[in-house]
């Protein structure tokens, strides 16, 4: 009896409140200054849970230390070093400190507090609920151009500036509570596959379509080509998984096909793959033109500063591009600011995540959750070629990167418990089983027998 109570006490929480606080704080548009620091909703949450999250990871609460953890930590420190080299530590220590907090703390909150299928599903529920709340405001903003949420929060605190663009597809771009309309779409888009595979598990096809339509609607009203691309990639991968579900190595086949097509395009075309990508995956020709020239001139700066980048210094460009100061490519910005080592470290963390999670033999709801997670992460990483991620959206990327590491520690028991929990919520309850449900931390009789 004592062992059972001990197992209950040491079991990870299935609905950690920090997950809900952090997800909803990402959508808070206000900020204020305190002691020289610019604080926003999500930064307050990061500061409050910084030490519990990191201490939990160090104490083993998040499982053993993984190569992904090391890559993320080294990326953070290398980026901080590049800022110091380019600008000096004395004048940048506050900025560097906040950058490291925004890089590491969201990741470690996810690592420490998402430790099983139930807590992972709770995170997806919180994200879906937030998007459901923002959807009617996005609809209203697209038709009227008014931003009620920014106006509401702006009566009390400073908020993000309101962006006004030319209409697209006859509608205005919805910003809701994000710093920019494109960030609203990119923030919502990863929830598409997560909603289908996690919240839609054991639900009918039409219920799944209804749930994902909420996410798709929010993404649509951002009228952002980067967010559209994110969802298109997810739909393509979900379709591939469904069509070739009988094929055991379908993802290796898809990767091989992609590599062959990439090689053919590079050899047989007079344009680079980036130029082809930028031309065909943007809503306006002018945007494609700007991105191609930005990539070319920013790449020259990277080649001149390959180790530490140029920090926050302005990138070199001709006088006729002086007004195009932004670089709408997250991976290009990382390399431009911090050099090739930072790019290799962060991309390496993503690649290691895919290979390690993909090699795990999982079944049931846990396997579907992993599939939804990897598709969402891939969609976000690819769409980041067309948009820079900053503020809450960058923190969300780091959070999402850490939110799937628990799959490496998932076992058959967690998958079975998750299957039963999700089936019950979906209306399909298990009526009978020969085996009692094991408490977290307990070993079943069969498992004890196998260990002798």
Image: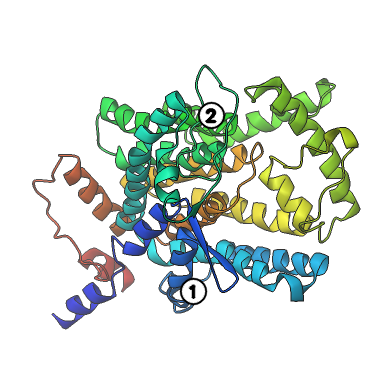
Q: Outermost residue toward the top?
A: 170
Up the image or down, 407 lies above or below 261; here it is: below
In the visual, does 209 lie left or right of 41? Answer: left
- Nearer-the-camera pick, 283 or 450: 283
Mark number, residue 189: none
Q: Outermost residue toward the front?
A: 155
Q: Position of residue 184 (x, y in %)?
A: 50, 40
Dot 2: few (<14), some (14–19), or many (≥20) neighbours within 10 Å? many
Q: Is residue 363 visible?
A: no
Q: Position of residue 254 (x, y in %)?
A: 58, 31
Residue drawn at point x = 17 percent, y = 45 percent: 424
Up the image or down, 12 lies above or below 290; here it is: below
Determine which residue is flagged by label 1: 54
Residue drawn at point x = 88 percent, y = 44 percent: 300
Up the image or down, 45 lies above or below 223; here it is: below
Q: The N terminus appears in which quarter of the rendering?
A: bottom left
Across the whole image, how many numbered discs are drawn on residues? 2
- Nearer-the-camera pick, 213 or 440: 213
Secondary structure found at label 2: helix
In the visual, does 158 lie left or right of 321? Answer: left
Mark number, residue 228: 2
Dot 1: few (<14), some (14–19), or many (≥20) neighbours within 10 Å? some
Residue drawn at point x = 42 percent, y = 33 percent: 138
In the visual, does 175 lie left or right of 273? Answer: left
* C-alpha gap between disc 1 and disc 2: 35 Å
- Nearer-the-camera pick, 43 or 397: 43
């Amino acid at each position: 009896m004592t062992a059972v109570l001990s197992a209950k006490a040491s079991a990870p929480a299935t609905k950690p409140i920090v997950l809900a606080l952090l997800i909803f704080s990402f959508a808070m548009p206000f900020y204020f200054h305190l002691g020289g620091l610019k604080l926003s909703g999500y930064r307050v949450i990061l500061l409050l849970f910084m030490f519990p999250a990191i201490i939990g990871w160090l104490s083993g609460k998040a499982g053993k230390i993984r190569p992904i953890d090391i890559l993320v930590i080294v990326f953070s420190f290398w980026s901080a070093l590049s800022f110091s080299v380019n600008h000096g530590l004395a004048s940048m220590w506050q900025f560097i400190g906040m950058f490291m907090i925004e890089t590491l703390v969201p990741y470690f909150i996810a690592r420490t507090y998402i430790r099983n299928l139930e807590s992972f599903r709770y995170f997806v529920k919180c994200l879906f609920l937030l998007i459901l709340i923002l959807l009617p405001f996005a609809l209203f903003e697209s038709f009227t151009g008014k931003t009620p949420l920014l106006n509401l929060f702006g009566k009390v605190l400073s908020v993000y500036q309101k962006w006004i663009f030319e209409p697209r597809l006859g509608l205005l771009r919805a910003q809701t509570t994000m710093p920019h309309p494109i960030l609203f779409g990119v923030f919502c888009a990863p929830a598409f596959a997560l909603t289908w595979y996690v919240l839609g598990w054991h639900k009918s096809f039409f219920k799944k379509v209804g749930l994902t339509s909420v996410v798709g609607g929010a993404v649509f009203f951002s009228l952002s080509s980067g967010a559209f691309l994110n969802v298109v990639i997810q739909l393509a991968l979900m379709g591939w998984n469904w069509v070739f579900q009988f094929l055991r190595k379908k993802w290796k086949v898809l990767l091989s096909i992609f590599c062959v097509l990439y090689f053919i395009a590079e050899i047989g075309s007079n344009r680079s793959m980036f130029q082809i990508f930028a031309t065909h995956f943007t809503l306006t020709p002018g945007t494609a033109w700007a991105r191609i020239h930005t990539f070319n001139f920013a790449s020259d700066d990277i080649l001149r500063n390959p180790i530490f980048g140029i920090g926050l210094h302005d990138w070199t460009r001709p006088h006729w591009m002086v007004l195009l100061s932004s670089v709408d490519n997250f991976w290009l910005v990382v390399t431009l600011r911090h050099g090739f080592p930072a790019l290799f470290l962060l991309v390496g963390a993503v690649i290691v995540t895919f290979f390690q999670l993909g090699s795990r033999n999982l079944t049931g709801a846990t396997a579907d959750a992993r599939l939804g997670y990897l598709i969402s992460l891939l969609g976000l990483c690819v769409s980041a070629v067309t948009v820079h991620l900053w503020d809450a959206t960058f923190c969300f990327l780091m959070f999402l990167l850490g939110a799937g590491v628990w799959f490496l520690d998932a076992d058959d028991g967690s998958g079975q418990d998750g299957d039963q929990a999700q089936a019950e919520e979906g209306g399909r309850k298990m009526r009978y089983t020969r085996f009692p449900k094991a408490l977290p931390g307990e070993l079943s009789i069969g498992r004890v027998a196998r260990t002798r």
